Image (tube, grey):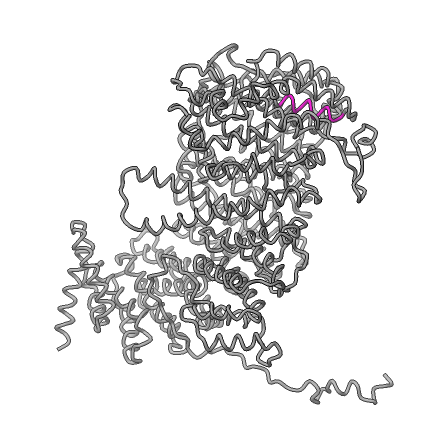
Amino acid sequence: MMGDPVAEMCDQLVKAVNVMMDAESSQIYRLEALKFCEEFKEKCSFCVPCGLQLADKTQTAVVRHFGLQILEHVIKFRWNNMPQQEKVQLKDCAMGLLSTGTYPILEEESHIKDVLSRIIVEMIKREWPQHWPDMLKEMEALTSLGEAQTELVMLILLRLAEDVITFRTLPTQRRRDIQQTLTQNMESIFSFLLAILQIHVDEYRKLTFLFCAKAHCRVGVATLNTLAGYIDWVALANITNDNCHLLEMLCLLLSETELQLEAAECLLIAISRKGKLEDRKPLMVLFDDVAMHYILSAAQPVGVGVVETHYTFLKRLCQVLCALGSQLCSLVGSDVEVEVPANLSKYTEAFLAFTTHPSQFLRSSTQITWGTLFRHEILSKDPVIIQMTIKYFRATMTNLVKTGFPSSNDSPSCEYSRHDFDSDEDFNSFFNSFRAQQGEVVRNACRIVPLEAFQIAAEWLQYQISTPIDIGSTVSKTAEGLCSILSPSAVQWDAMTFFTESVVGKIFKNLPTAERWREDPLILSCVLTNVSVLFPFVTHRPHFLPQVLYKLFASITFEVVEESKAPRTRAVKNIRRHACSSIIKMSRDYPQFLLPCFDMMYNHVKKLFSSEPLLNLLEKCALMEALVLISNQFKDYNKQKNFLEELMATVAARWTSDEMRHVLWDPALFLDFVGADQLVAEGTEHTTSINRSRLSFCVYTILGVVKRARWPADLEEAKAGGFVVGYTPNGAPIYRNPCNAQVLALLPNLLALIRTHNSLFLPENMCRLSETFSKAYDMIEVEKNVVLGLPQPALDIYDPPVYKTHLERMQGFFCTLYDNCYHTLGKAGLSLQQDFYTIEGLAEQIVGSAFVSLDNVPDHRLRTMLHILLSISQSHMNLVVSCPQECYNSLLCPLLGPLFAYMLQVFLCQWYVDNLLTSVCSGEEEEEDESCEENQEMLEEQLVRLLTREVLDLLSKSTLLGEKVRLLGCRERFSTQPTGELTELGKCFLKHEDIYMTLLTISFTSLSWKDTSNCHRSASIVCWTLLRQVVGGNLLPEAVTWFYTSVLKGLQMHGQHEICNSALTQLALLMYENLRPRYMELRDVMTQIPDINLEALDQYDQRLLEPSSAQRLGEKKRKDQFKKLIAGTVGKALAQQFKKEVHIRNLPSLFKKPKPEKRDILETSESGALATLFSPALDDI
């Protein structure tokens, strides 16, 4: 009677499956069919007979696959409730499908094999080994039925290893049982796999030219894939058993075209294994003649052009050689006494072949191993490696040349690049990384053969100097006859320059001086780099210095077309910037050497400044900075002060003039002065651009002087020069900066400019912007790309002139001016020291300028202010870092206290809006301008996230002592007493209750904001360190409750992330254990957790409140119990919220160790006891 409903249901299911898979079906019908199938799997009581009937070979592949899916669903979700007889019956039916339910191996669909193997593995995970002890024997018996069954057995064994070892999709006890049983039987499993592999490889070789050989080849591939799934985790002894028979077979299979890729995968996994060195020693057998012969033979090219499968194999083989090199470096010179292999030259030649292969990817793959070999204490001294180092240098000369763009056909590398990279931009990004790798390896290699390395660099430099310029087919748009960045000469010069930099960075020998200079901007850029790199040699030949300086000054004013009014190209701009940077670098690193040429340089700079259009403001400022750096070597306060006064005279007069004062103090006048309220048509000249340039030059100059002017580092020289004006109570000298008087006189107008700049965002001033400049305050594209993490614009090989619209120029002006004002204010403390910090009312002046109109300042500007003015980093000495301790109360507390309070309100509002938008956006959205709106939303959200990180960074680094705070993941318990982990500034904040409570509120509130990095940092470092300082005080119960609830909210938001979960759980545990005895209210919070076990909570509280209780648990058990208590608060990722849980029951454990019997330590035994050691009979000992 049951046959009819089964058959009827099967007919309906077949129709439903066909509707779902039919491309012609409408969406409504497809959804109805899907709903019917899913309801059938969930509710129908005769799923198994239907599944078996649909899985029959007579059905179509799609229907068979659905039938097998039904069986898999039954096993995963109904197995625990099935009677034993039905389980046995289903298992027998499944084994029957393995035996006779499939087509021959070459005809059967791969997805049918996959789902069939999943069914068997799901049963194994639930029943083996306890209830299915003969599973492995049954699998072995199946292999005798044919190639199809053998392949299925391989798939089953592979998936079992993946689920148990790789993905760990089982409960701990079941996983342990299965893994230990597999380990116990691993010797027989490996023997079985190797026997199967040997049989089918032999058959494949016998029948190579017949169709049936493909079946044996398919089994061989499946067996190798299964071996790969086990080699990664089994004991190394299983891999090296029988004199490394497995490795020998894999090496032999490298010569079989159809099997070589999988064999190389297995070989790679085996050679890459870590573990004890003595266990890895047998792997050195691969350096023997036979193994090395097969590896070298497999690397030979096949056919003409790029054969994709062979190219993929070459990548694996290259990785094999890399892994072999790593093992060699680990074993040679270690305690296991491995000698340098006799075949080392063969190995390095093979490895060098990959380094010189046309594929840029293969070349790059060898770099790390070369670096390891060259750094190795013993191998780097071997004659083979020494000779190979020189060959590596020669190969690098070719590899550093940027060729092989996918869109080109000018190199054999291009064809390979089309397989590896999607675009020229991808290739360019890769090549930059590859070049950096080569630079590091070259520097390591220079230690081995320094003279030869320098000789190669010198020869290459001389060759490039003497070689005519070849512009190639890609002509620059800068001017006729110049190189583009891909011209042959440009890429050769670029490669040579990088090589020379890497070599000279390690070596210091004499080099013939090159006198020829090129007028091509790209070539000249490379020449400038070489001059900069080789400048240390000039210190030994001082008579060359004037020539070098004149050449550099000529490059600062470099033009391709003299007196052209067209915008300069990037290449020309880069030359001028490069020359400026070189002069600053020389002035910074060799000021004493340049001091005799100071007057010559100063006069030349004056001459350049006299012609205003000759230099832009950045170039002028760079030259001024160089002069200031050299002037630091005067070591005479009055002389340097007079020089700085003369240098800044023009700027000081302009900056302090009445006209400028009115402009800087009035937003309306300021907008008129810079032309932001004027309508300007594109293509016409903006008359106020000169005002913007002069204003920017003033700020740049003040910044340059503040940044560069210093007193002598040597105390005696500083005292002799008049730089020391006194000593602090602890004996530290108090210095005065020769720029103090000039900068302090300019400071009021600088603060006024900052205040005016903030006021520009007020609605009444926003209205003053003309239509042309209505978006002048928006983020520039470069800033947006940085915030969103987008790549830089595409590579432009033709270098056209850089045209900017009036709006882009205005945006750049506001952005740079804003940044430079804060840079100047931030560095003033370090530069001017006590003269700055003792300014009367400094805190009020800064608050009245930098913190004005913050409600209207956009996030990207607010972030700039925080990052530049206040953020704390080793490379950024600013207002907070430089502040002396005695000024904390008078300056930093009045500054940072209101700022933290303001930022807290900003974050509460912004994150609330962000969460609200997230919940609203779940509905339907209109498609108009959707992309643009989404980009803006992403930008705003990311800005909020970055702004939050800036504030938390400031909070943690200013209050926590160097942030050298132990992470909460550590095992050690934290004391509730303050342990001095607060900085002096943090201790100062602690005395101001309002500021400290604001810091605590920010830290704990940030736990539930949608930013995992903020959450983890606050939970693991900041929250408890701040809170425990006040635990001993009189915290209100409401405050304690709020702090604890904030942690639980953090778990609800970020609990699905393991790293956040761990930190938040540990924080909650610390708070509960330290605060629960004093605050009963925490128990009330715990009782509100969903699904909490109140009885377990009572037991936990009892142990906590009675420390002397015999039931006191160890830390790990206590933590595990607490995790169970708060498990109801842990949020799930969206993808996991509606996922149906799979429950696998534990079986009686096979490997449970008996607990040792407890006995009295004083109890006597056959071997004597502790008590006998103190017996009177032993007194004579």
Based on the displayed image, in which of its 4 quarters is residue 974 positioned?
A: bottom right
Based on the displayed image, in which of its 4 quarters is residue 867 positioned?
A: top right
Look at the magenta stretch and give its main secondary structure. Answer: helix
Indicate left or right for 1066 with 13 as reference: right
> At x 62% / y 35%, what residue is drawn?
826
Residue lying at the far right of the rendered structure? 1180
> At x 63% / y 59%, what residue is drawn?
1029
Q: Is residue 242 visible?
A: no
Task: Indicate the position of residue 178 as horizontal and vertical percent values.
Answer: 44, 71
Residue lying at the far top of the rendered structure? 563
What span is in magenta? 622-633
Rendered position, 743 above or below 331: above
Rendered position, 20 above or below 636: below
Residue nearest the observer in this picture, 303 or 880: 880
Task: Indicate the position of residue 553 as horizontal and vertical percent values.
Answer: 63, 17
Rendered position, 705 above or below 384: above
Task: Indicate the position of residue 783 as horizontal and vertical percent values.
Answer: 47, 34
Magenta stretch: includes residue 380: no
Q: Quadrant of the C terminus?
A: bottom right
